[in-house]
Amino acid sequence: MPHEVDVTIKALDSLLFRRRENLNVLVLLNGGGAEALRSAVQNVSQVQVFESRENLGVAGGRAFLAAQDVAKKADIIALLDNDLLLTLDYLEPLCELLMQDHSIGVLGASVLNYQYVVCRFDAAERLEKGPLGQSLPRISNDDLRGYVEQHHTEEVFFHLGVDPDWMRAYFPKLSFEEEYARRCGGNPGQDVMLSRNTVVHDKFVKGGPEKIDVSNIAGCTQVFRRDLYDEVGGIRAEYSPYGYEDADFCIRSLLAGYKNFTLTNVFSLHGTDDRHQQRKTLSGLWPAKRNTARSYAFLVKHHCPKSRKPFLVKNFFMRAGIDVAAILWRLYHQTAGLIIRFAATVVGVIQAQITLVFDRSPATKDDKAFSRQDSGFGEE
C-alpha cells in the first residue's frame, strides 16, 4: 500500500542483503503509486515494481504477480508480505528441499513476532547496511533457532501452520464442552493453530523434527514450485482483499496428493508495523471481520462437504452463544461493583433528602441544651 513504502523497503533490504543469483523480486504497490519505492530500487536490476491504481487485494495482487512473464518462467515462487524481516539464509533451505522432494507441495518458515524477538538481540553489534541503505539487524536461522529453544512462550510465535487435518481445522464438529475448552485454553495441546499448541512448542525445545506436517501455512511465508501453482490452478483472486486465500491454496495442494510442511529451522520475523493491531481497534474491526466472513464463505463453498455444513451452522450459533455469555459475564463482573457503588450513593442521597424534608419533629430538651452549649451561650 502507498503508506507502507518505508516498511516495504526494509523487507526488501533484508531479502536482498545476500546477493543471490537467479533471484527475481516482483513488488506490487497496491492502490496507488510511490516514487520513493521506485527510487529505492532503481539500481537493483533484480527488482521490478508494479503499480495498480485499483487495490487488487492480497489474493488478487499475488495472482497478478504470478501471471507476469518472469514469474511464469520461475522454478520456485516465494510469497512474502512487506511487514517481514528475513534471516540471512531464509531462502536456501526452503528452495533446496522443494527441489529435492517433489512430494512436497507448500513449504513455510516458522514465523516469529518481531517485537518479541528482535529487541532480545544485541542490535548494535549486528546492524549492517544492505544494498538499499537500511540499517537492519542481520540474524541467521541458527540465531533464531537457539533463541526459540530458550524462549518458547506463545508470544514468540506468530504462525507455525495449521493442524494437518484441514477438515478439523476449518470445518470442525465441536461439542459445547470442546468449544468451551478451546475458548478457555483448557486443552492448548489440541489447538488447531500450532502457534498456540503446547505440544508443538515442546518439540521446538527438545530439538524435534525439522519439519511439521501442516494443512495450511501463512500466506506471508508460502514457498512452492511453479509447476504446483499451475497444477492446482493458482491463487483465487475472489478471496480479495484478504482472508483464507492461503488456506484455499494449501488445501488444493493436499487434494492434489502433496504434503505441506513448516520448517522448524527456518525463520522470518513478522510485524514490523502495526497493521494487525489496527484491525483490533473499533475502526478496524468492521472491515477485518467482514473480510473474514466473506472469505470463509468462499472456503466453505469450495471445500466443505454437504455432510459437514450442518455442523458449521450449529457451531456458529454455539460460538455466538458463548460469546454473548462471555460478554454478559464480563459486563457483570467488571462493572457490577461500579454500578452498585453509584446506585448506593444515589439512593443514600435521596433517602437523606427525604428524611430532611419530611422529618419535622421538634427538638428535644437535650437537643436545645446541646445547641446552646455548643454555641458558647449556655446558661451559667
Image: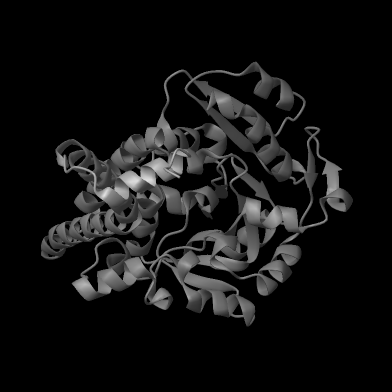
Q: Which image quarter is the C terminus in?
A: top left
User: Where on the picture, by quarter, is residue 162?
Assistant: bottom left
Say which of 375 and 304 sits in front.
375
Say which of 88 and 74 sits in front.
88
35 over 331 or under it: above or below: above
In the rendered image, residue 356, in percent from the top left (x then y), is placed at: 22, 39
Residue at left offset 73%, top offset 53% = 119
Instruction: Classify residue 359 as left or right of residue 375.
Output: left
In the rendered image, residue 7, in percent from the top left (x then y), is placed at: 64, 35
96 over 209 or under it: above or below: above
Residue at left offset 43%, top offset 42% = 378
- Color style of the picture: one colour
Q: Give the number of callouts.
A: 0
In the rendered image, residue 237, in percent from the top left (x then y), is placed at: 35, 37
Q: Is residue 209 visible?
A: no
Residue at left offset 15%, top offset 57% = 317
**Residue with the most extreme bottom position:** 206
291 over 176 or under it: above or below: above
116 over 58 or under it: above or below: below
Instruction: Classify residue 169 as left or right of residue 229.
Output: left
Residue at left offset 14%, top offset 60% = 309
Q: Is residue 337 visible?
A: yes
Instruction: Classify residue 298 as left or right of residue 55.
Output: left
**Residue with the most extreme front position:** 380
Instruction: Classify residue 309 as left or right of residue 57.
Output: left
